Image (cartoon, rainbow, N blue to C red):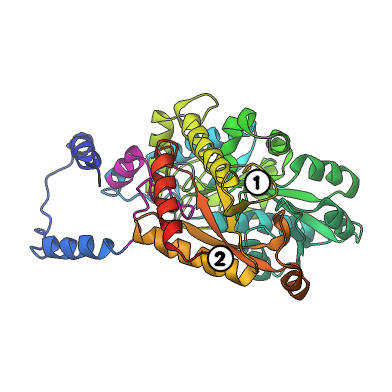
């Protein structure tokens, strides 16, 4: 691991924080238990049983290390441990959350809105669909929710929790919601909400949001955009391919948006965010608490969230990161996104030039996720080879991921006998999420280890 700057940064900031409370009378605290050192030594040893998520050679799942300023700010505020539910639980951290969320909303062109942080993207999506259900109930209207079959599985589970009917819409060969299938469901007249995904978890596909907005004009539904993974790519929209660019340019037309700062936003887990275009949806959150909200006439974040206690530390870490790296187009933060996407395009180009592999028929990755299969005579053999290469890479400390994708998403077919027998089978593929800026400079090393691992695997 590289030298960690956080301990020194935290030491200096801790002294400054102590000065802020120096006016308080001295008091005695219990002496630290001498066993703490031993316990922490055990913790450090146990944590070694992890993939090196922080390292550029980890190019598997959606795991990105938090920025040092986020880590330091989070640790610093833990000495106070504010609760961003009511103002008396976290005055400063509540203000920081409001400011940080305002900056996120500004990415999408929103100024008048309602929004707050959550403990996860799942909770953020739950709130968005809960509001949709409340609106349907308020007006006595239909309540069915639809989303792509490639949307995150959380939407179907959330709908079940909320007792709302959910229908999965088929995806096209690009992994995007199929518009013909969507319109067929809309014609039934009972769809209340369409969930569009900007950045699917499997391949980073971007649903055709502009066309979905046009369908809303005809069928009148609520539009929720799940941009938990891909939301920050709005900052580099000019560098995306045309279909994705048009989708991001229409995101301001959504009724609600979810984005996860703990993915591309350089934050520790868990830090999600939900935004509503209409601040009036706050009426659904209204509740009475005889002991919570009387300390201030200003907005208490607990008055606009389903969660009660929420970590003020998450808000402080996000605010601090925004001060150092503002989420604006053309800034240093946006450059990091562009570097990750450039690495994905580079890897995809190398794979397409190698006859052993086949990339998706879509051509370029839409964001920074690359998926590919190993050519073989049957899907079973292709899947087996993918597993073997995955393990051989891990033995060389290169960590990729596996994903099952429809065979129809690739150009070539398997042998006729196998194809007739399986129809549109799923095949296990290799997958890489290149979301670290460092991945761009490390691509040669990644490719070298990948090629070496492939050479160890039995030929097809």
Q: Dot 1: what SS?
A: loop
Does residue 179 lie above or below 415 as drawn? above
Decide: is 108 above or below 62: above
Helix, strand or loop at label 2? It is loop
In the rendered image, which quarter contains the C terminus? bottom right
Return the residue at label 1: 198
User: Dot 1: within a 10 Å radius of its alpha carbon, few (fewer than 14), some, or many (20 or more) residues?
Assistant: many
Q: Which residue is mark 2?
A: 460
Measured as percent of width and height from the top left, residue 382 is found at: 59, 66
Q: Which residues are magenta?
A: 50-75
Residue 396 position, x and y percent, is 34, 57
In which quarter of the view is residue 234 placed? top right
> Is residue 93 something one can see in this rendering?
no
Residue 70 part of the magenta-drawn span: yes
Residue 90 forms part of the magenta stretch: no
Q: Assess whether mark 1 and mark 2 are in contact (beta carbons under 8 angstroms).
A: no
What residue is rendered at 43% in x and 49% in y?
84
As drawn, the residue found furthest toward the front would be 459
């Amino acid at each position: 691991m590289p030298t960690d700057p956080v301990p020194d940064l935290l030491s200096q900031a801790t002294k400054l924080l102590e000065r802020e409370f120096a006016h308080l009378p001295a008091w005695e605290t219990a002496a630290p238990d001498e066993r703490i050192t031993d316990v922490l030594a055990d913790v450090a040893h146990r944590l070694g049983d992890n993939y090196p998520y922080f390292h550029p050679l980890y190019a598997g799942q959606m795991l990105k290390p938090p920025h040092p300023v986020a880590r330091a700010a989070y640790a610093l505020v833990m000495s106070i441990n504010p609760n961003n539910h009511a103002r008396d639980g976290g005055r400063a951290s509540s203000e920081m959350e409001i400011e940080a969320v305002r900056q996120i909303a500004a990415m999408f062109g929103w100024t008048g809105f309602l929004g707050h942080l959550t403990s996860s993207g799942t909770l953020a999506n739950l709130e968005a669909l809960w509001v949709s259900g409340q609106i349907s109930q308020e007006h006595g209207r239909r309540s069915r929710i639809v989303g792509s079959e490639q949307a995150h599985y959380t939407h179907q589970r959330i709908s079940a929790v909320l007792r709302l009917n959910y229908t999965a819409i088929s995806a096209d060969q690009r992994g995007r919601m199929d518009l013909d299938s969507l319109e067929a469901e809309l014609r039934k007249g009972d769809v209340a909400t369409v969930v569009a995904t900007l950045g699917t978890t499997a391949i980073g596909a971007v649903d055709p949001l502009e066309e979905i907005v046009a369908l809303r004009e005809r069928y009148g539904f609520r539009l929720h955009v799940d941009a938990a993974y891909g939301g920050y790519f709005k900052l580099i929209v000019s560098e995306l391919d045309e279909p994705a660019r048009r989708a991001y340019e229409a995101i301001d037309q959504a009724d609600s948006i979810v984005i996860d700062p703990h993915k591309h936003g350089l934050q520790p887990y868990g830090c999600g965010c939900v935004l509503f275009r209409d601040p009036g949806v706050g009426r659904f959150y209204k509740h009475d608490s005889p002991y919570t909200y009387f300390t201030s006439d200003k907005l208490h974040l607990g008055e606009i969230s389903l969660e009660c206690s929420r970590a003020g530390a998450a808000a402080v870490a996000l605010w601090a990161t925004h001060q150092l790296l503002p989420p604006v187009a053309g800034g240093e933060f946006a450059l990091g996104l562009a570097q990750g996407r450039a690495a994905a395009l580079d890897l995809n180009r190398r794979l397409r030039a190698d006859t052993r592999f086949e990339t998706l028929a879509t051509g370029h990755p839409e964001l920074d996720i690359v998926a590919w299969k190993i050519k073989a005579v049957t899907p079973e053999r292709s899947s087996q080879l993918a597993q073997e290469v995955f393990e051989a890479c891990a033995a060389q400390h290169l960590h990729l991921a596996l994903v099952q994708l429809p065979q129809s998403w690739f150009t070539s077919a398997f042998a006729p006998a196998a194809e007739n027998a399986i129809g549109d089978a799923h095949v296990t593929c290799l997958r890489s999420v290149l979301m670290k800026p460092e991945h761009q400079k490390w691509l040669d090393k990644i490719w070298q280890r990948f090629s070496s691992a492939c050479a160890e695997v039995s030929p097809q």
